[in-house]
Image: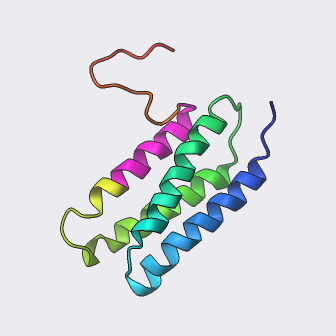
């Protein structure tokens, strides 16, 4: 089944913008916007897992959002944002390797 990745990209850009702009321009971390973005990229991992190719722009958009969060770290209480960054980085790894987020379990070998 061919998925319209351009549509997924536009949705990702919208959610990323809603979250990252207040973060970078006003130094405000909007938790509800982050959770909206997070749930969308988790869904992306399942939608794109069987695709042979993923638009580079999808990965770039997620990477830019992660970079914005890394830049915000100096303005947030210590440790508050690190877990959020790590979660998005793990999802980035899932997207780039064709895995679904949440399917890995510690101590259990992966079957490919």
Identity of the residue drawn at 69% across and 56% down = 9
Residue 91 in the magenta stretch? The answer is yes
Drawn side of residue 14 relative to residue 5, left or right: left
Q: Main secondary structure of the magenta part?
A: helix
Drawn side of residue 29 relative to residue 43, left or right: left
Q: Magenta span covers which residues?
A: 85-99
Identity of the residue drawn at 60% across and 44% down = 44
Q: Position of residue 45 (x, y in %)?
A: 57, 39
Q: Observer-nearest residue: 47 or 111?
A: 47
Q: Is residue 26 above or below residue 48?
A: below
How many marks do you count on the picture? 0
Q: Observer-nearest residue: 47 or 70?
A: 47
List the single residue furthest toward the bottom.
26
List the single residue furthest toward the front.
32
Residue 71 in the magenta stretch? The answer is no
Q: Position of residue 91 (x, y in %)?
A: 47, 44
Q: Dividing the picture into quarters, in which one does residue 62 lie?
A: bottom right
Identity of the residue drawn at 50% across and 37% down = 94
Q: Dividing the picture into quarters, in which one does residue 75 lie?
A: bottom left
Q: Quadrant of the N terminus?
A: top right
Q: Position of residue 57 (x, y in %)?
A: 66, 55
Identity of the residue drawn at 43% across and 34% down = 102
Q: Is residue 78 above or below residue 92?
A: below
Q: Position of residue 68 (x, y in %)?
A: 44, 69
Q: Is residue 31 above or below residue 26?
A: above
């Amino acid at each position: 089944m061919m998925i319209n990745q351009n549509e997924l990209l536009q949705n990702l850009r919208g959610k990323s913008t809603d979250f990252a702009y207040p973060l970078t321009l006003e130094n405000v971390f909007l938790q509800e916007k982050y959770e909206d973005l997070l749930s969308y990229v988790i869904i992306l991992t399942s939608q794109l897992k069987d695709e042979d190719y993923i638009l580079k722009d999808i990965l770039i958009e997620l990477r830019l959002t992660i970079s914005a969060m890394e830049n915000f770290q100096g303005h947030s209480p210590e440790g508050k944002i690190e877990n959020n960054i790590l979660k998005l980085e793990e999802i980035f790894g899932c997207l780039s390797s064709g895995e679904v987020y949440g399917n890995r379990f510690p101590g259990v070998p992966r079957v490919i």
